[in-house]
Image (cartoon, grey):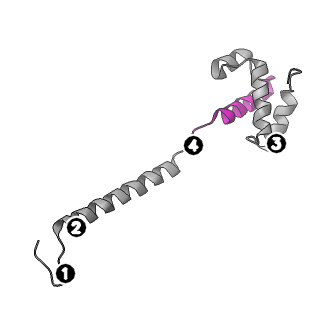
Amino acid sequence: MQPSRFGRIASTDIDAQVERYKRLRRKKRDGERRRTRPLAETDAHAMVRVALAWLPYGGVPADELLVHFGLTEDQFVAALWQIMADGHCAREDARDIAEHYPRSKNN
């Protein structure tokens, strides 16, 4: 590259700046993709969602609990109460769950 009247710029400096710019753009684009991607459903949210979906039918059947979560009914109820205690459930949902899934006598 020829020296310019504004100073000497080597082609390697320009290449380095272009590469740095490309890396920054990729990083920004990847960050935007992560922010727009839906969040993965956690186990706690899945348990609350399933518990609420089955409320009109008298609760989640034992075989569904075993298949989806690998839990017995007592374990599922204990987990729901722990989720509610940890605050991972909306207040209205917690009230509905508490009404339909009473704590077992063992907890």
What residue is rendered at 57% in x and 39% in y?
40
Residue under the point 27% across and 65% down: 17
Asked if disc 1 and disc 4 are in contact, CB closer than 8 Å, the reply is no
Q: Where does label 2 land, which residue?
A: 13
Label 1 and label 3: CA atoms lie apart by 68 Å
Q: In the rendered structure, does residue 104 fall within the stretch colored magenta?
A: no
Front label number (4 vs 2): 2
The amino acid type, in three-letter code, at marker 1 is Gly
Q: In which quarter of the image is residue 92?
A: top right
In the rendered image, which residue does mark 4 sit on?
A: 39
Position of 7 relative to 79 (above/below): below
Secondary structure beneath label 1: loop
Three-letter amino acid code at disc 3? Glu
Alpha carbon separation for disc pair 1 and 2: 13 Å
Q: Given the current orientation, which residue lies at the most extreme top position?
A: 63
The answer to whether mark 3 and mark 4 are in CB contact below 8 A is no
- Decide which of tag 2 and tag 3 comes sooner along the chain: 2
> Where does the image place residue 27, in percent across and percent down from the top left?
40, 55
Relative to 79, does residue 72 appear above or below in the rendering?
A: above
Q: Residue beneath label 1, please?
A: 7
Give residue 71's position: percent from left, percent from top.
Answer: 70, 19
Query: For the residue carrying disc 3, how many other residues have a C-alpha within 10 Å: few (<14), some (14-19), or many (20+)?
Result: few
Name the magenta segment's main secondary structure: helix
Q: Mark 3 points at which residue?
A: 92
Q: Residue at position x 83%, y 27% from top?
A: 101
Range of residues picked out in magenta: 38-59
